[in-house]
Image: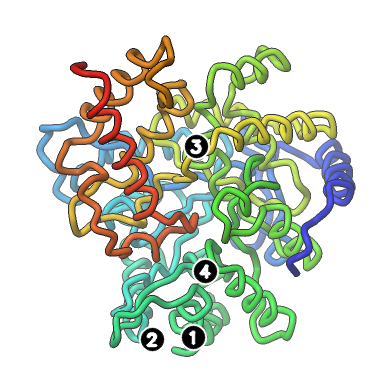
Amino acid sequence: MNKPLSRRNFLKYLAGTTATAATAPVLLSSCGRSGEARNRAGSSMTTRINPNSGDVVSLLGYGMMRLPELPKGTPDAPQTGPFDQDMINRQVDYALEHGVNYFDTSPVYCRGLSERCTGIALSRHPRESYFIATKLSNFDNRQWTLEASQAMFENSLKELQTDYIDYLLLHSTGGGGRDPETGENLSGLDVCQRRFIDNGLTDWLVEQKKAGRIRNLGFSWHGDYRAFELLMRLHDEGRYHWDFVQIELNYLDWFYANEINGSNVDAVTLYGELHKRGIPAVIMEPLLGGRLASVNDNIAAELKQRDPEATIASWAFRFAGTPEGVLTVLSGMTFMEHLQENVATYSPLQPISEEDHEFLMHIAEEIFGQKEIPCTACQYCMPCPYGIDIPAVFAHYNRCIREGNTPQSSGSPTYRRQRRAFLVGYDRRVPRLRQADHCIGCNQCAVHCPQQIRIPRELQRISAYTEQLRREGGPL
């Protein structure tokens, strides 16, 4: 299973997908529980059919992970805390009107309020007009018991104001954790066994599926590839049937995920394992946490030269949506303009050609050469017990790499400008008490990182680099 899918085989899948996309009806935007497709007037959203259920699913899925918030200083809403429910409602309405019918949430998103906000917004529409995806996010080792996980599922139904879940996922099945008794770090494989298999949880979820409370059962994967192999083996042996699997896929991770963090696996391999089994793939991180929408000026110029009318982000979305067997591509759309742009990209999809694919592999090689930290700002590492804003630290460092503001030699003619940009920008974006120098290396963050980033090591590296810049060069 570790043998990656070759470029030749990918292009074979690509050719089949392109032919299918050219003949498939793209005006079907939503369906009911029976799988009967319905036209939505004015919508040209590309759709895909789940072969396990007959669901006609929009190629663009709405990720409810980064919801819009009220302006600072606004009194908290009584039910949804700092989140702007009126704006969430408007964006959900727009999405449904334009053919988006797959909404992905979790008990842990948005400080635990995503399901509630999603339920409020969606419950204003007919239940058969959308699909809800949520997760068993029992990350805390106190939640690894069957009873605690069952309670989480029941609470999801309550928050989402529904009596069934269309797509239920075992959440982040390769992520590590700590033994609840000894406190020692556990591998992603061990945690997967304890969270989902040994406690009887997945068997119970299968029973809920038979009872109609779950319509499609699957999992999302990050981290320890042995957990992915375990779940594939259980599928092959017939113990469980996965109706779908959620993986990270984008044109940088296609061949470079393993080289970026050293312990992950390339997207081409994950996709290949699902494709050969006929398991539909739900795609997360098509923009890699926004990284592929904010490339440096040189790379942006290359993309614009190839297609002046295309946005930078649309290249990544087209890549993620092209492969055969991709059911939907998730995007966490905080702002209405992001939603509108992504709807336009998939209404309908213009599949990536063989030449486009080779071009994007060239772009990926250039991005990989910048050596950014592969943080997607998922917040799974937070809160830090010592107050460090880990995603903000990494975001500033990566931004400076892209903008050419990480000076390496005090003899450079641009050193003074770059040094000032790095240090002043750091203090503006990350308060001093939340910066990298407060890391003590406790490693509580790293075991939860889906990207397998060695977070303490990277924080200490940034801290040392920052201190060096502060000592050198005199006043700012």
Q: CA distance from mark 2 to mark 1?
A: 9 Å
Mark 1: which secondary structure?
helix
Q: Position of residue 395 (x, y in %)?
A: 38, 36
Please state which amino acid type lies under the numbered disc 1.
Trp
Residue at the (42%, 40%) spot, across then down? 92
**Looking at the rendering, which quadrant does residue 17 occupy?**
top right
Residue designated by label 3: 95
Mark 3: few/some/many CA within 10 Å (<14, 14-19, 20+): many
Residue marked by disc 2: 146
Look at discs 2 and 4 and give the one toward the viewer.
4
Q: Is residue 407 above or below residue 70?
A: above
The answer to which of 373 and 40 lies nearer the viewer is 373
Question: Camera-side residue: 238 or 387?
Answer: 387
Name the side, left or right, on which 3 lies relative to 111: right
Q: Is residue 455 visible?
A: yes
Q: Quadrant of the C terminus?
A: top left
Amino acid type, callout 3: Ala
In what element is the residue under mark 3?
A: helix
The numbered disc on residue 204 is 1
Q: Earlier in the sequence, mark 1 or mark 3?
A: 3
